Image (cartoon, rainbow, N blue to C red):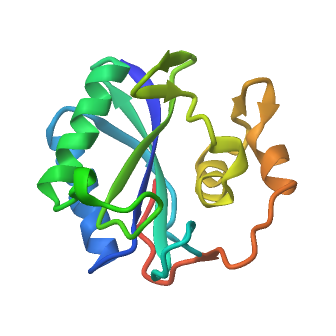
Amino acid sequence: MTVAYLCLGSNVGDRAQTMAQALATLCRAGLTLRRSSSYYETPPWGPVPQGPYLNQVVEVDSPIGPKSLLALGLEVERMLGRDRPNEVRFGPRRIDIDILLFGDETVREEDLEIPHPRLMERAFALVPLTEIAPDIVVGGVRASEALAKLDQSGITRHEDSASHT
């Protein structure tokens, strides 16, 4: 088993329900949930007008490798209605599942980069990550130190936050 951190996000429909469905589906497929952050409402990124996101980071034990985990995440997104080929880059998402970290592995392939290449620039991922793993280090930098340098305005813990362990 390898400990992995996934970031789930949604800004279309019942965001919390969709994220809960995604996590349940990932666990039914063999991942074991270790910890999950609260839900955080975050401002959208990109040029397309859209509503705010809910984001959450989960720590899981993965019995599969990073490429298989990517394939599983893409399949769960598809099952929950994400249409990647026809969506606008940085546009609205019913569900988004990103692999942030996979053990201490580094992967640099055309369709997969781990650690996530923009993790340390994204407060919407670092806020929930540091909630559940405050001392985690990515590329020699403590995630909490990277987060302290980022604009966190507009990021709020969601009132209907999932219970986390």
Q: Quadrant of the N terminus?
A: top left
Indicate left or right for 70 with 131 as reference. Answer: left
Q: In the displayed structure, would residue 44 be above or below residue 137?
A: below
Q: How many marks?
A: 0
Q: Going 45% across and 74% down the picture, which residue do you hit?
A: 161
Indicate left or right for 40 with 28 as reference. Answer: right
Q: Nearer the viewer, residue 118 or 86?
A: 86
Decide if residue 52 is in sight here: yes
Indicate left or right for 95 with 113 as reference. Answer: left
The answer to which quarter of the image holds residue 50 is bottom left
Q: Going 30% across and 36% down the picture, which residue do you hit?
A: 32
Q: Position of residue 133 (x, y in %)?
A: 63, 43
Q: In the displayed structure, would residue 81 be above or below residue 142?
A: below
Decide if residue 63 is in sight here: no
Q: Position of residue 81 (x, y in %)?
A: 16, 62
Q: Going 43% across and 27% down the picture, which residue do you hit?
A: 112
Q: Going 63% across and 55% down the picture, which residue do you hit?
A: 131
